[in-house]
Image: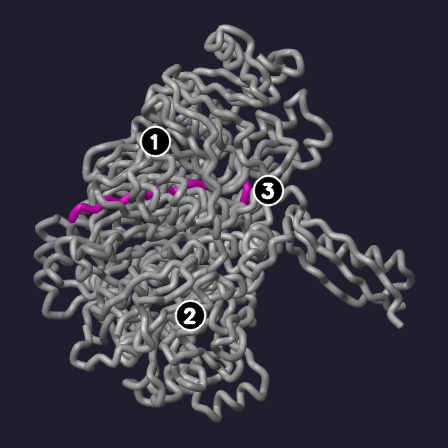
């Protein structure tokens, strides 16, 4: 074995983030002390990011198959859902929080690039992108800088790649001041039976690296632990990874074309832990090994050490296992697209990864113990109920002063950036390329994408109200799933499956872990109710604000990315009122409930209320009413009540066609709760008056309450005889809040 | 008549064009790889589409590198012989860089990418691309570009006007070409032009993204039908 | 006194420069084969009012650090000359 310095001891392992036990386990696995390169390999593969060691135990409790799933969670880069007519959909969400906090533009851009690669390595063509963003106080100059960078990064990357960014959510809360969240989701389609696997079958088959050259990107942790590090080497360490969407576009087209040659056995994207992760995961999946010559890997810098090549996270690279004898077919495709495609090794039958440099073996480790589901550690962390939880207050009418001037209260609420139009953001994203986007000029609760060659469409959204999850991790996570499903249903679709991006604080903090465990529990329960299994996703721990004397975790933010199917493109529903005279109806139960509402947080500065009331069963029945009513073509529009309550819901439905409403409370609920409360499981629909009885029948047979609210009018917003004025005024406010802060 | 859609590395509206021309209008269409050097299957009756996207990543200047792609000599020759050429978005940028159309497309004046539906006012119906429109017709379709600010010098502008080469202007829904509607700061709200001979067209907005009821916009059909000289009743 | 500053901003040497890479690869299309390793940066010119060159340098440096340059991605250097 080649090793320039003496073998590392535990102090080195510790610097690499490994525990004493883990270090001992490595020695046991190898039957000897690892050299530095080998230790680095274990350290990245057993990191939280690759091994899910602190989360997998609970992730396994989520429903991960059934329904329309063709490939379950964890089996491939992303789950695969049967959408009918011979087509399948692959979709996944992933975080890029910490890189985006350092360099927002590149961090967000490379996040988008990474998630699309996960999809097209499965042979699926990405047809839509979504993102879920969380920033701090929008009035802080640093937040503005982060927003501008992240938005431009997402836009420049996705726009160039030619994948429309069709949906998303953006929230502003102080808990994200230091630690923003950037979660990116990709949705792709592929013909059933034409998917690719990340496998390395067939000893003797050649292994290729394709795409960009390898640089010293993303290897800081390991590098600073390296005793072998020269000053010269450290100087060259890039602080960030630079994304190249043009390269990715070529890689996308070349990869999809390469499959059609039949020469490809398996392919995997190089994300975290680069060559190490792709070689070990592909080998472990096939029960094979690989022998890789690191000298053959094209590098961007000349003085790269073996461990640097192995750990590099340079973007836009893939590992391909090719059928022996059919290398020319592969090379021809990549040559056509002007991409580097280098033979770097071969598949072996040893079950080991052997890395060679300058003719000598520099690392020799078994593949299986490195990977999740193989020998990677699995931990069950201790947890305890967070102290704040029992101190949260269930606010009643007497504890909240009713506004004297409702118009002023409404104006104040509608000036919250959380409720305002995000058009400053989404107008920087190409959302119409690929000519499938159905809601380009028709606003709806979910993004809706027609699937060419079928009559179907896909509905998709990302959702998580983290205030609710903070207030009650269990209930809040159920609500996140429920709201996603509600948004699918309100677009005319049926919920099918979810992907999740679990953003939490430090898992070694017992209270954070309590949030995590309960969030998973609630999520699992809701997913079972809606029959929406989890196809995969990503866990991001250590999201926190470091203060001089404490560390504050972010609000727990388990973002749900949901996929739904419209059996017919004509089932599509918008959220906009269509014509004056239509009846406005609320489906669901109205009651006094201002807990965790944007109104309490923004107008009253109250942040210690409980989660809003929620019943999974009631939610399910409400959604069934909408599905049935849409099947019977009774609905003109549908829009769920979420942040900002009924008033925000109505205004949003008025904007597009510049219509008004005449609404009467007719119920014994105080007006502030009626207008601003965020009790769950409520959907507002507009219908032709001739359809009212039919809708009542549907609600009755589902034991769901139906409340007649009033009707659509010309342009005035009239509620309970209060004249809120012309819709134009509200539309202007809606459109200008964020623009004025950022332009 | 048939259509050829050039595919540069980084083109991303090529599939959309093939879909609209082939599936929606049922016309013959094929892709042409940028490394080809000739257009043997095409006559001057046929139309070469230079689609949108980010050819060569739009690095250096939008269209600057694509303009020197091997196929471009043949495209230029096709245009010089009177063959039809239609460039949309990045395609418009490439045609300007190649000198097939006058002027240049600069970074949007707000320095931001713009993706939204806009209204175009048809400035002339005496050109092939707009022959089935009426002058002053208003068409709604998406724009999606970062470098869409049309610019040319005063002399060129005058000659564009004198020769009826201005096809579209950015407008509001009342047909007024105000500064507010001038989304990217183009000179005199210009959104699309043709060459003097009237066989080469360029525009920033995307008619192919507004040609199907499923996507909720259909105004783009008028331009394709004009270009294809399809009978109006064959509209899909 | 008034000075003119000329600032050269370049991507850090160790970072990937996608633009430079793409230009390098495509120069042969116009028949130029002898060029390699193109890297593309920015050139900024500005005028600055200051008591002396040291102060001018200080102000320009601040402008670079805070706005003109993304020091995570780019490095810079500048020259100052007295404006006639």
Query: For the C terminus of chain A, which image quadrant?
Result: bottom right
> Which residue is more in the foreground, A139 or C78?
C78
Q: Are marks 3 and 1 on the same chain?
A: yes
Give the image location of residue B131, x and y in percent: 31, 86
Residue A236 relative to residue B111: left or right:
right
**Mark nearer the viewer, 3 or 1:** 1
Give the image location of residue A741, x and y in percent: 55, 63
**Mark nearer the viewer, 2 or 3:** 2
Marks 3 and 1 sit apart, C-alpha to C-alpha, by 39 Å
Q: Secondary structure at mark 2?
A: helix
Q: Are marks 2 and 1 on the same chain?
A: no
Q: Which mark is residue A148?
A: none
Q: Which residue is mark 2?
A: B75
Q: Earlier in the sequence, mark 3 or mark 1?
A: 3
Q: Visible in this render: residue A117? A: yes
Does the CB distance between marks 2 and 1 fall below 8 Å? no
Residue A480 relative to residue C21: left or right:
left
Image: magenta residue range? A85-100
Instruction: Residue at 79%, 58% (x, y): give it.
Output: C60
Question: Callout 2 environment at 10 Å: few (<14), some (14 to 19), or many (20+)?
Answer: many
Q: Which residue is mark 3?
A: A240
Question: Callout 3 environment at 10 Å: few (<14), some (14 to 19), or many (20+)?
Answer: many
Q: Visible in this render: residue A475? A: no
Query: For the N terminus of chain A, which image quadrant?
Result: top right
Is residue A655 depicted above or below C21 in this figure? Answer: below
Marks 2 and 1 sit apart, C-alpha to C-alpha, by 39 Å
Q: Residue A91 lies in magenta, yes or no? A: yes
> Which residue is more in the foreground, A149 or A287?
A287
Q: Which mark is residue A325?
A: 1
Instruction: Residue at 57%, 36% (x, y): give it.
Output: A299
Residue A551, by quadrant, is: top right
> Which residue is more in the foreground, A563 or A178?
A563
């Amino acid at each position: 074995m080649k090793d320039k310095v003496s073998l590392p001891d535990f102090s080195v392992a510790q610097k690499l983030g490994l525990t004493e036990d883990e270090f001992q386990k490595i020695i046991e696995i190898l039957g000897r002390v690892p050299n530095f390169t080998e230790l680095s390999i274990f350290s990245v593969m057993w990191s939280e990011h690759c091994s899910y060691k602190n989360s997998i135990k609970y992730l396994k409790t989520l429903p991960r198959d059934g329904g329309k799933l063709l490939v379950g969670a964890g089996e491939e880069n992303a789950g695969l859902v049967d959408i009918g007519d011979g087509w399948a959909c692959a979709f996944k969400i992933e975080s890029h929080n910490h890189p985006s906090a350092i360099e927002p533009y590149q961090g967000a851009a490379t996040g988008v690039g990474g998630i699309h690669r996960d999809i097209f390595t499965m042979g699926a063509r990405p047809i839509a992108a979504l993102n879920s963003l969380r920033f701090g106080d929008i009035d802080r100059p640093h937040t503005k800088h982060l927003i501008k960078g992240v938005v431009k990064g997402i836009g420049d990357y996705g726009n160039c790649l030619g994948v429309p960014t069709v949906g998303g959510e953006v929230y502003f809360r102080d808990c994200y001041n230091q630690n923003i969240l950037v979660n990116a989701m990709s949705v792709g389609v592929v013909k059933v039976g034409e998917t690719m696997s990340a496998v390395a079958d067939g000893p003797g088959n050649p292994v290729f690296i394709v795409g960009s050259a390898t640089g010293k990107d993303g290897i800081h942790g390991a590098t600073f632990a390296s005793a072998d590090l020269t000053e010269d080497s450290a100087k060259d360490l890039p602080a960030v990874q630079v994304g190249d969407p043009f390269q990715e576009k070529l890689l996308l087209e070349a990869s999809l074309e390469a499959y059609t040659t039949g020469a490809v056995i398996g392919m995997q994207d190089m994300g975290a832990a680069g060559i190490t992760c792709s070689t070990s995961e592909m080998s472990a999946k096939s029960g094979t090994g690989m022998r890789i010559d690191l000298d053959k890997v094209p590098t961007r810098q000349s003085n790269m050490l073996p461990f640097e090549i192995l750990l590099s996270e340079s973007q836009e690279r893939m590992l391909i296992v090719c059928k022996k004898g059919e290398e020319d077919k592969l090379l021809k495709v990549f040559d056509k697209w002007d991409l580097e495609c280098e033979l770097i090794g071969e598949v072996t039958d040893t079950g080991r990864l052997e890395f060679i440099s300058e003719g000598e073996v520099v690392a020799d480790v078994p593949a299986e113990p490195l990977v999740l589901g193989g020998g990677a550690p699995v931990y069950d962390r201790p947890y305890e109920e967070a102290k704040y939880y029992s101190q949260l207050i269930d606010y009643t009418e007497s504890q909240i002063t009713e506004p004297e001037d409702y118009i002023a209260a409404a104006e104040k609420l509608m000036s919250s950036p959380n409720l305002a139009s995000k058009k400053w953001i989404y107008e920087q994203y190409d959302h119409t390329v690929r000519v499938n986007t159905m809601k380009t000029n028709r606003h709806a609760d979910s993004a809706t994408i027609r699937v060419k060659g079928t009559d179907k469409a896909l509905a998709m959204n990302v959702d998580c109200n983290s205030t609710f999850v903070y207030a009650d991790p269990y209930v809040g996570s159920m609500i996140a799933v429920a709201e996603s499903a509600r948004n699918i249903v309100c677009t005319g679709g049926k919920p099918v499956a979810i992907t999740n991006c679990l953003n939490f604080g430090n898992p070694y903090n017992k209270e954070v872990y309590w949030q995590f465990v309960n969030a998973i529990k609630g999520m699992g329960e809701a997913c079972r109710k809606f029959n929406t299994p989890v196809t995969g996703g990503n866990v991001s721990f250590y999201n926190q604000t470091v203060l001089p004397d404490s560390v504050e975790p972010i609000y727990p933010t388990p973002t749900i990315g949901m996929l739904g199917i419209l059996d017919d493109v004509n089932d599509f529903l918008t959220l906009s009122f269509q014509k004056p005279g239509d009846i406005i109806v609320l489906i669901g139960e109205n009651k006094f409930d201002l807990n965790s509402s944007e109104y309490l947080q923004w107008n009253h500065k109250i942040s210690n209320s409980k989660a809003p009331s929620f019943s999974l069963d009631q939610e399910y029945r409400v959604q069934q009413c909408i599905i049935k009513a849409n099947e019977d073509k009774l609905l003109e529009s549908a829009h769920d009540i979420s942040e900002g309550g009924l008033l925000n819901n109505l205004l949003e439905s008025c904007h597009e066609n510049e219509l008004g409403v005449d609404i009467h409370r007719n119920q014994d609920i105080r007006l502030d709760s009626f207008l601003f409360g965020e009790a769950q499981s409520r959907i507002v629909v507009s219908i032709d008056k001739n359809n009212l009885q039919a809708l009542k029948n549907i609600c009755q047979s589902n034991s769901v309450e139906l409340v007649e609210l009033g009707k659509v009018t010309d342009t005035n917003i009239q509620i309970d005889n209060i004249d809120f004025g012309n819709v134009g005024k509200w539309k202007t406010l809606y459109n200008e809040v964020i623009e004025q802060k950022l332009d | 008549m048939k259509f050829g859609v050039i595919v540069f590395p980084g083109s991303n509206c090529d599939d959309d064009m093939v879909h609209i021309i082939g599936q929606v209008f049922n016309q013959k269409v094929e892709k042409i790889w940028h490394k080809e050097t000739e257009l043997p299957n095409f006559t001057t009756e046929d139309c070469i589409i230079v689609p949108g996207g980010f050819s060569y990543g739009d690095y250096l200047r939008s269209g600057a590198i694509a303009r020197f792609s091997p196929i471009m000599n043949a495209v230029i020759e096709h245009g010089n012989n009177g063959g039809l050429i239609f460039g949309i978005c990045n395609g418009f940028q490439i045609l300007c860089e190649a000198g097939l159309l006058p002027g240049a497309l600069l970074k949007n004046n707000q320095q931001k990418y713009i993706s939204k539906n806009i209204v175009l006012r048809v400035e002339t119906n005496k050109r092939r691309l707009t022959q089935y429109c009426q002058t002053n017709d208003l068409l709604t379709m998406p724009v999606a570009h970062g470098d869409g600010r049309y610019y040319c010098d005063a002399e060129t502008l005058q000659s564009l006007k004198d020769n009826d080469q201005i096809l579209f202007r950015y407008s509001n829904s009342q047909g007024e070409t105000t500064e507010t509607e001038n989304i990217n700061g183009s000179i005199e709200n210009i959104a699309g032009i043709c060459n003097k001979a009237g066989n080469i067209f360029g525009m920033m907005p995307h008619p192919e993204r507004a040609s199907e009821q499923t996507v909720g916009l259909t105004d783009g059909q008028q331009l394709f039908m004009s270009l294809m000289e399809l009978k109006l009743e064959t509209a899909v | 006194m008034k000075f003119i500053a000329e600032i050269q901003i370049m991507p850090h040497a160790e970072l990937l420069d996608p633009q430079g890479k793409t230009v390098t690869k495509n120069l042969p299309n116009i028949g130029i084969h002898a060029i390699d390793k193109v890297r593309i940066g920015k050139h900024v010119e500005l005028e600055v009012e200051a008591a002396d060159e040291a102060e001018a340098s200080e102000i320009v440096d601040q402008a670079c650090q805070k706005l003109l340059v993304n020091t995570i991605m780019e490095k810079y250097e500048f020259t100052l000359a007295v404006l006639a």
